[in-house]
Image (cartoon, rainbow, N blue to C red):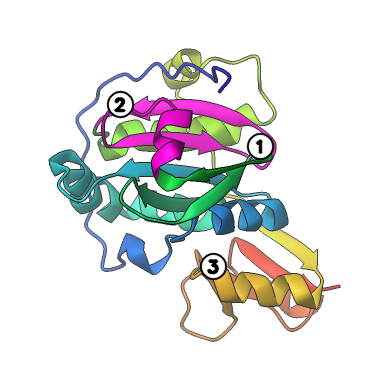
Amino acid sequence: MKKGISFLLILFGAVLTMAASSFKDFSVIDFDNAFKISELTGKKVVVMFTSDDCYYCKKFEDETLTNTGIIEWLKTSFIFTQITSSNIKTAKYNGKTYTYSQLFGAFGVRGTPTFAFFSKTEYFGTVSGFMDATNFMNILKYLQYYEKNKEVTMADFIKSKTEVPLTKKILSLTQQDIDLLLKIDPNVKIYAPGLDKYTNVVAESSEQAEKLENYLIFIKK
């Protein structure tokens, strides 16, 4: 496994805002499906290597993943998935098939939680240990910023306090691809009034899509 970006994490005290939404409402439960969604949408992937008896994994779920800003960013710009070594599933990565247990070794996971970050074409690296909302948000925003600013290190990005806003995106997909997203991504819904703007929605037409406030919208080609 090639070495990715070295993340320099600067510790801050995070003020957490509790949200009614649960990360389980939008997290993808299958490693392969996470990358299928990334391929279709361009969203980045966050894989959380976890274990059933991991205290800091539960702390991350209860504290960081309940932060309103984190939920908004994950739903809009990322695919979040968790895997455990006890799961008997297999996954494909870089042309090879792994058991979930073997994935822990492939990515050098020595303890949980460990987080691996990807785009659909690039492996960025891993971060081990509990992260509060501030540190985790720094990484999410940096990865978004890094797309067009690859020369900027994470340390410089944090120091600069650069604002990285969520932006609206409308994607034209085949009906087959839309049907697949509706099947495997719990955060993709056919548009209906009452859905929050961080839900990825399927619109009836480009005209409707332009009027919607949702950040990620799919229309049929």
Residue 188 within the segment the image draws in magenta:
no
Residue 130, placed above or below residue 211: above
Does label 1 or label 3 sit earlier along the sequence? 1
- Residue visible at 68% across and 56% down in the picture: 41
Label 3 sits on a secondary structure element that is loop
**Residue 3 on image: x %, y %:** 54, 17
The residue where tag 2 is placed is 110
Label 2 sits on a secondary structure element that is loop
Q: Is residue 50 left or right of residue 5?
A: left
- Label 3: few (<14), some (14–19) or many (≥20) C-alpha neighbours in 10 Å: many
Q: Amino acid at mark 2?
A: Arg
Residue 42, placed above or below residue 147: below
Q: Is residue 124 left or right of residue 16?
A: right
Residue 148, placed above or below residue 182: above
Badge 2 vs badge 1, beta-carbon distance below 8 Å = no
Looking at this view, name the residue that lies furthest to the right. 221
Identify the magenta region: 101-129
The residue where tag 1 is placed is 94
